[in-house]
Image (cartoon, rainbow, N blue to C red):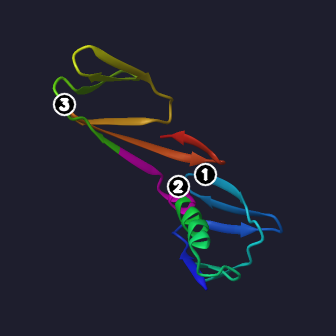
């Protein structure tokens, strides 16, 4: 029997067809696809899943949802090359890719970019209600 630890401040509920996972950063509703689930203390148990590659994929997907609703996601990009630079002006991320290519990205209100050095930047984003929002 496979199980996952439910993170702090995350609640899991389900009905016949849907699994609802709610945390501090939002709610995601996912189809259950015939899963039998049980919770005990801070663990979510998958009762009718066999130990196969396909079942591990579904458990991994639920674990990714737990991460998304509890602490969000972070992506770090390192720029390597001559003339590669990153900077932020207002709400515009400016990536200079070589000397002749400049990429400007106007980011949404919930997207946070941090330029750590001229060649490294961080992006932090959040998944809410099944859609990807960035924060």
- The residue that disc 3 covers is 81
Q: Residue furthest front?
A: 53
Q: How far apart are the two marked residues, 3 and 2, measured between alpha carbons?
A: 32 Å
Q: How far apart are the two marked residues, 2 and 1, measured between alpha carbons?
A: 8 Å
Q: Single out the mark in the foreground, 1 or 3.
A: 3
Residue 46: which quarter of the image?
A: bottom right
> Magenta segment, which residues?
65-75
- The residue that disc 2 covers is 68
Q: Any mark on residue 57, and which?
A: none
Is 134 situated above or below 54? above
Q: Residue furthest right?
A: 16
Question: Left or right: 87 with respect to 19?
Answer: left
Q: Around disc 2, counting alpha carbons within 10 Å, would you say few (fewer than 14), some (14 to 19), or many (20 or more)? A: many
- The residue that disc 1 covers is 26
Residue found at x 30% / y 17%: 101
Q: Secondary structure at mark 3?
A: loop
Is 72 situated above or below 117? below
Query: Cβ–Cβ below 8 Å for labels 2 and 1?
Result: yes
- Position of residue 54 measured from the top left corner of the image (x, y, whole percent): 61, 69
- Position of residue 48 measured from the top left corner of the image (x, y, whole percent): 71, 81
């Amino acid at each position: 029997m496979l199980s996952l630890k439910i993170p702090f401040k995350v609640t899991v509920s389900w009905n016949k067809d849907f699994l609802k996972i709610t945390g501090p950063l939002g709610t995601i509703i996912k189809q259950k696809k015939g899963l039998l689930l049980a919770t005990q203390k801070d663990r979510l148990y998958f009762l009718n899943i066999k130990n196969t590659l396909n079942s591990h994929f579904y458990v991994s997907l639920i674990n990714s949802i737990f991460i998304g609703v509890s602490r969000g996601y972070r992506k770090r990009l390192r720029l390597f090359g001559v003339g590669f630079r990153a900077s932020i002006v207002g709400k515009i991320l400016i990536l200079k890719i070589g000397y002749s290519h400049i990429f400007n990205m106007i980011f949404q209100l919930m997207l946070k970019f941090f330029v750590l050095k001229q060649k490294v930047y961080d992006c932090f984003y959040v998944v809410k209600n099944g859609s990807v929002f960035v924060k």
